[in-house]
Amino acid sequence: MTPVSTGAGEVGRPLATVPPGERGATRIADRVVAKVASQAAREAVGDLTKDAARPHANVVVHHETARVLVHLELDYPTDIGSRCATVRRHVVERVGALVGMEVPEVAVHVERLHPARRPGAAQGRTR
Protein backbone atom coordinates (compact mmCIF):
# COMPACT_ATOMS: atom_id res chain seq x y z
CA MET A 1 0.00 0.00 0.00
CA THR A 2 1.34 3.41 -0.86
CA PRO A 3 1.34 6.19 1.68
CA VAL A 4 -1.21 8.98 1.31
CA SER A 5 0.18 12.49 1.02
CA THR A 6 -1.69 15.36 2.62
CA GLY A 7 0.11 17.87 0.44
CA ALA A 8 1.92 19.47 3.40
CA GLY A 9 5.04 17.35 3.02
CA GLU A 10 4.00 14.70 5.54
CA VAL A 11 2.59 11.27 4.99
CA GLY A 12 -0.90 10.63 6.40
CA ARG A 13 -2.48 7.37 7.42
CA PRO A 14 -5.66 5.95 5.87
CA LEU A 15 -8.85 7.12 7.57
CA ALA A 16 -10.08 4.92 10.38
CA THR A 17 -13.45 3.27 9.93
CA VAL A 18 -16.24 4.38 12.21
CA PRO A 19 -18.16 1.60 13.98
CA PRO A 20 -21.73 1.14 12.61
CA GLY A 21 -23.38 2.22 15.87
CA GLU A 22 -21.66 5.61 15.72
CA ARG A 23 -22.29 6.49 12.05
CA GLY A 24 -25.68 8.12 12.52
CA ALA A 25 -29.18 7.28 11.39
CA THR A 26 -31.44 7.82 8.43
CA ARG A 27 -34.84 9.29 9.18
CA ILE A 28 -37.62 8.87 6.63
CA ALA A 29 -40.29 11.58 6.78
CA ASP A 30 -43.90 10.66 7.45
CA ARG A 31 -45.02 12.15 4.13
CA VAL A 32 -42.61 9.91 2.21
CA VAL A 33 -44.05 6.83 3.91
CA ALA A 34 -47.55 8.18 3.19
CA LYS A 35 -46.73 8.46 -0.52
CA VAL A 36 -45.44 4.89 -0.60
CA ALA A 37 -48.59 3.70 1.21
CA SER A 38 -50.83 5.67 -1.19
CA GLN A 39 -49.15 4.14 -4.21
CA ALA A 40 -49.46 0.65 -2.70
CA ALA A 41 -53.19 1.24 -2.11
CA ARG A 42 -53.61 2.36 -5.74
CA GLU A 43 -51.89 -0.81 -6.91
CA ALA A 44 -54.11 -2.99 -4.72
CA VAL A 45 -57.41 -1.31 -5.67
CA GLY A 46 -56.79 -1.45 -9.41
CA ASP A 47 -58.91 0.38 -11.96
CA LEU A 48 -61.88 2.35 -10.70
CA THR A 49 -64.57 4.42 -12.39
CA LYS A 50 -63.69 7.87 -13.70
CA ASP A 51 -65.56 9.51 -10.81
CA ALA A 52 -63.53 7.76 -8.09
CA ALA A 53 -60.79 9.68 -6.33
CA ARG A 54 -57.36 8.10 -6.06
CA PRO A 55 -56.56 6.48 -2.71
CA HIS A 56 -54.50 8.53 -0.29
CA ALA A 57 -52.92 7.76 3.07
CA ASN A 58 -52.08 9.40 6.38
CA VAL A 59 -49.14 7.97 8.30
CA VAL A 60 -47.70 8.34 11.78
CA VAL A 61 -44.12 7.09 12.15
CA HIS A 62 -42.65 6.28 15.55
CA HIS A 63 -39.09 4.88 15.46
CA GLU A 64 -39.17 2.02 12.93
CA THR A 65 -42.95 1.57 13.05
CA ALA A 66 -45.56 3.16 10.78
CA ARG A 67 -49.29 3.28 11.47
CA VAL A 68 -51.26 3.88 8.27
CA LEU A 69 -54.76 5.17 7.53
CA VAL A 70 -55.83 4.69 3.90
CA HIS A 71 -58.78 6.60 2.42
CA LEU A 72 -60.29 5.13 -0.72
CA GLU A 73 -63.37 4.84 -2.90
CA LEU A 74 -64.62 1.55 -4.35
CA ASP A 75 -66.91 0.39 -7.10
CA TYR A 76 -70.32 -0.99 -6.14
CA PRO A 77 -71.23 -3.83 -5.97
CA THR A 78 -68.04 -5.35 -4.58
CA ASP A 79 -66.84 -7.46 -1.68
CA ILE A 80 -65.74 -4.58 0.54
CA GLY A 81 -64.13 -6.75 3.21
CA SER A 82 -62.04 -8.66 0.71
CA ARG A 83 -60.93 -5.53 -1.13
CA CYS A 84 -59.94 -3.82 2.14
CA ALA A 85 -57.99 -6.92 3.25
CA THR A 86 -56.13 -6.88 -0.08
CA VAL A 87 -55.27 -3.21 0.39
CA ARG A 88 -54.05 -3.81 3.96
CA ARG A 89 -51.87 -6.73 2.93
CA HIS A 90 -50.35 -4.90 -0.04
CA VAL A 91 -49.63 -1.73 1.96
CA VAL A 92 -47.85 -3.74 4.67
CA GLU A 93 -45.74 -5.59 2.07
CA ARG A 94 -44.77 -2.52 0.02
CA VAL A 95 -44.00 -0.20 2.94
CA GLY A 96 -41.93 -2.94 4.55
CA ALA A 97 -40.04 -3.66 1.34
CA LEU A 98 -39.46 -0.09 0.15
CA VAL A 99 -39.05 1.81 3.42
CA GLY A 100 -37.96 -0.95 5.77
CA MET A 101 -40.54 -0.17 8.44
CA GLU A 102 -42.82 -2.45 10.35
CA VAL A 103 -46.51 -1.73 9.75
CA PRO A 104 -48.56 -3.23 12.60
CA GLU A 105 -51.77 -1.40 11.69
CA VAL A 106 -53.42 -0.38 8.43
CA ALA A 107 -56.87 1.13 8.83
CA VAL A 108 -58.92 1.41 5.64
CA HIS A 109 -61.60 4.07 5.43
CA VAL A 110 -64.00 3.58 2.51
CA GLU A 111 -65.25 7.08 1.83
CA ARG A 112 -67.57 6.37 -1.05
CA LEU A 113 -69.03 3.61 -3.23
CA HIS A 114 -69.47 4.23 -6.95
CA PRO A 115 -72.03 2.22 -8.93
CA ALA A 116 -70.28 0.23 -11.64
CA ARG A 117 -71.29 1.31 -15.11
CA ARG A 118 -72.46 -1.51 -17.34
CA PRO A 119 -72.25 -1.13 -21.09
CA GLY A 120 -75.70 -0.37 -22.47
CA ALA A 121 -77.17 0.33 -19.03
CA ALA A 122 -79.34 3.40 -18.70
CA GLN A 123 -77.78 6.39 -16.99
CA GLY A 124 -79.53 7.50 -13.86
CA ARG A 125 -80.41 6.34 -10.42
CA THR A 126 -79.76 2.73 -9.38
CA ARG A 127 -82.35 1.03 -7.20
Image (cartoon, rainbow, N blue to C red):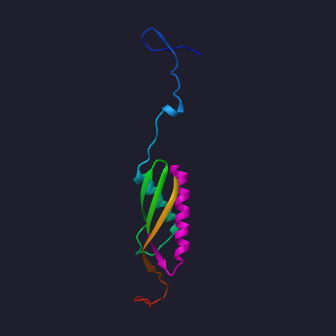
Q: 58 or 119: which is nearer to us?
A: 58
Q: Examine the structure image and report whether residue 14 is included in the region drawn in magenta.
A: no
Position of 71 compared to 85: left or right? left
Compared to residue 7, the image places residue 47 above or below, namely below
Q: How many marks?
A: 0
- Residue 22's spot in the image, x, y percent? 49, 31
Q: Quadrant of the C terminus?
A: bottom left
Compared to residue 42, the image places residue 17 above or below, namely above
Residue at coordinates 52% horizontally, 60% vertically from top-left? 91
Q: Quadrant of the N terminus?
A: top right
Q: Examine the structure image and report whether residue 93 is included in the region drawn in magenta.
A: yes
- Residue 114's spot in the image, x, y percent? 44, 79
Q: Which residues are magenta?
A: 72-101
Quarter-of-image position of residue 71: bottom left
- Residue 9's spot in the image, x, y percent? 44, 8
Magenta: main secondary structure equals: helix
Q: Hey, which residue is sitting farthest top in the picture? A: 9
Compared to residue 126, the image places residue 113 above or below, namely above
- Residue 62's spot in the image, x, y percent? 44, 50
Q: 119 or 102: which is nearer to us?
A: 102
Residue at coordinates 41% horizontally, 88% vertically from top-left? 123
